[in-house]
Image (cartoon, grey):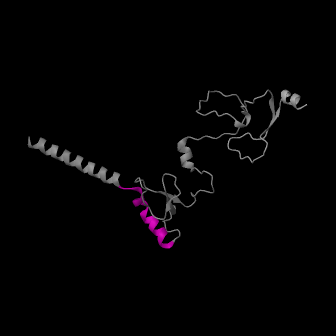
Amino acid sequence: MKKLFGSIVVIVLLLAVLAAGYYLGSTRTAPEAHAPAAASVADNGEAGAPAGERRILYYRNPMGLPDTSPVPKKDAMGMDYVPVYAGDEPEGPGVKISLDKVQKLGVRTEVAALRDLSRTVRAVGTVEVNERGEHTVSPRFEGWIQRLYVNTTGQAVQRGQPLMEVYSPDLVAAQQ
């Protein structure tokens, strides 16, 4: 009986130690791991990181906002800022995706060639009317528009500016 009780106590203690280790390991945040490298960059401003590590330039907001920080911190929602390493900074207004993320996404590239599609591609999209080709006019006379000068919603017009040229056989007959 004492042997059984002793083994149960040992198992419970072992489980408690494992649970405590898991809890301590999961609560450790990523910026603490990078804090020594960030401090060495802040101290001398240059390559203060060890030879095996890349140098951290700054930390950026994880939500894509243009907010950056020289030291690790959290945003308003409690998310850790993401480190930006030397060589990973974006070039201009374009989007740059790192090679490891491209590989994780499963992006494949191929030379463009004219060929038959072997499978159906289903995609979601919206269809919009080309306003430049849409015209609704309800004149008080019979005729048609020969030329349209203003053909876009929101297009600025000046007082006295012609909007369209209209041809009407009735108006021409009345004018003669």
Q: Quadrant of residue 124?
A: top right
Work out which residue is located at the far right of the displayed protein and give it: 176
Q: Total of numbered circles in the picture?
A: 0
Report x, y in % for residue 11: 20, 45
- The quadrant of the rendering that contains the C terminus is top right
Residue shown at the point (59%, 56%) measured from the top left:
90
Q: Is residue 153 left or right of residue 170?
A: left
Name the foreground residue: 79 vs 97: 79
Q: Which of the pair 11/72 is nearer the observer?
A: 72
38 within the magenta span: yes
Q: Is residue 4 visible?
A: yes
Left or right position of 17 against 154:
left
Q: Where does the image place residue 78, in percent across and percent down from the top left?
A: 40, 54
**Residue 154 falls inside the magenta stretch:** no
Q: Which residues are magenta?
A: 28-44
Q: Position of residue 98 (x, y in %)?
A: 56, 51
Residue at image position (12%, 43%) is: 5
Q: Main secondary structure of the magenta part?
A: helix
Residue 53 in sight from this viewpoint: no
Quadrant into which the N terminus falls: top left
In this rendering, is residue 98 above or below 137? below
Residue 9 x, y percent position in the rendering: 16, 46
Most foreground residue, 18 or 114: 114
Question: In the orientation shown, which residue stands out farthest toward the left?
Answer: 1
Q: Which of 95/103 is in front? A: 95
Q: Residue at x 71, y 40 (%)?
A: 152
On the picture, is 64 further left or further right than 116? left
Q: Is residue 41 left or right of residue 147?
A: left
